[in-house]
Image (cartoon, rainbow, N blue to C red):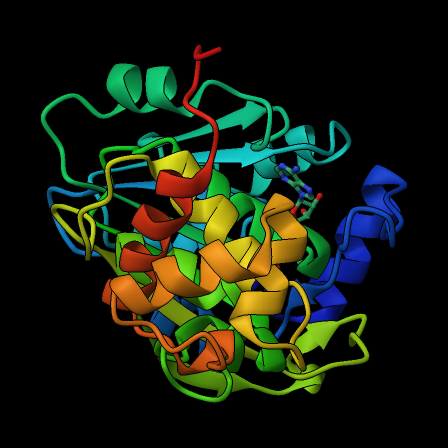
Amino acid sequence: MLDLCSPAVIRDIQTRYGFSFSKALGQNFLINPTVCPRMAEACGGEGCGVLEIGPGIGVLTAQLALRAKKVVAVELDKRLVPVLGETLAEFPHVKVVQGDALKLDLQELIGREFPGMQVSVCANLPYYITSPVIMALLEQRLPLTGITVMVQKEAAARITAAPGTRQCGAISAAIHYYARPETLFAVSRGSFMPPPEVDSAVIRLTLREKPAVAVSDEALFFSVVRGAFSMRRKTVLNCLSAAFRLSKEPLKLAMEGVGVAPASRAEQLTLPQLAALTEAVQGLLPQKGGE
Ligand code: SAM
C-alpha cells in the first residue's frame, strides 16, 4: 500500500499527474498518519458501507477500505479520478464516483450501492461546504447511522453545543434535532499539506431514529430557529417579530402562552422550547391556502 501520508509520495503523484492543489476546492490533504485510522475506526466496521465525500488522493479512503465492506467515494475534481485509480487499485470494494456531493442523488446512490448494509458518511471536506453538506445529508433523511467529518475547530464547538447553552447557534439546534453530535479529537493545521490557516477537529453525528422533538411543520421549525438566532444580541421576541413580520404584542402573548419568556435570547432555549415557539408562531401566521 502506498504511503499516502508521505509528502514525498504526494509530490511524486503531483509530478507524474501534473496535479496542483486547488484552493477553490479546499484541497488540503492529510499527512498526519494517525488521523485517518482514527476517523475510519469511527465509521463502523466489517459489514458496513461507507460513503466518503472528497477522497482527494485516497488517504482516508484506503483506511476506510481496510475496515468496511464497501466504500463509495464521491470526488468533484476530475483530475483526481485517474490518481485514485492508481492509489486504490488494491481495493476492489472501493468505487470512485466523480461528481458534486451537493448535487448527486445520494438517496438513490445509497440504495443502489449499499443494499442491506448499514451506511455511514465519512468526510474531510473544504470548510466552506461542511455545514451545507452536513445539513443536506440530514435534511434528505438519508438512511445513515452516522456522519464522521473533519471541521474547523470553531465549527466543532458550535455544532456540538447543546441547545440552551451559550455557544449554541442555529446550526447546533438544527443538528441536535436530527443527531447526537460529539467531538472525537482535535487535529492541528500541521496535519495537512498544504497547511490551512485554522486548526480542525473530527466530529461524529450519531443519527437519531426520530427527531429529538415533534413539530407539526418542520420547514417552519427551521425558519423559526433561523429567525430566533438571526440577531444574537436581540431578544427572541424582536428576532421573530422581524423575521416573520409579526406585531410584537400578539407574539409576546403567544410566547407566554407556550411558556417561553419573550425577553429570552435564542441560545437560552432548549429544543422543546424552540418547538413550542414554532407552534406559537404558526398560530399567528395566515393559514396556508386561506383567504
Ligand atoms: N480526503 C482527502 C484527505 O483527507 O486528504 C482530501 C480532503 S480535501 C480537504 C477535500 C476534498 O474534497 C478535495 O479532494 C476536493 O476536490 C473535494 N471536494 C470539494 N468539493 C467537493 C464536492 N462538492 N463534492 C465532492 N468532493 C468535493
User: In the displayed structure, would residue 275 be above or below residue 141?
Assistant: below
What residue do we see at 44% from left, 43% from top?
52
User: In the displayed structure, would residue 269 be above or below residue 225?
Assistant: below
What residue do we see at 57% from left, 60% from top?
248
What residue do we see at 69% from left, 55% from top?
126
Percent x, y of residue 33: 50, 77
Percent x, y of residue 205: 31, 62
Percent x, y of residue 215: 24, 44
User: In the displayed structure, would residue 171 be above or below residue 198?
Assistant: above
What residue do we see at 31% from left, 32% from top?
93
Residue 190 falls in image quadrant? bottom right
Say left or right for 233 vs 216: right
User: In the displayed structure, would residue 247 be above or below residue 258?
Assistant: above
Q: Residue furthest front?
A: 249
Instruction: Compare residues 157 and 12 and report the one nearer the observer.
Output: 157
Residue 106 falls in image quadrant? top left
Asked if residue 52 can be seen in this view, the reply is yes
Percent x, y of residue 223: 51, 45
Instruction: Compare residues 124 and 69 and report the one nearer the observer.
Output: 124
Asked if residue 42 can be seen in this view, the reply is no
Instruction: Compare residues 121 and 31 and report the one nearer the observer.
Output: 121
Instruction: Compare residues 149 and 240 and report the one nearer the observer.
Output: 240
For the image, the number of numbered tags is: 0
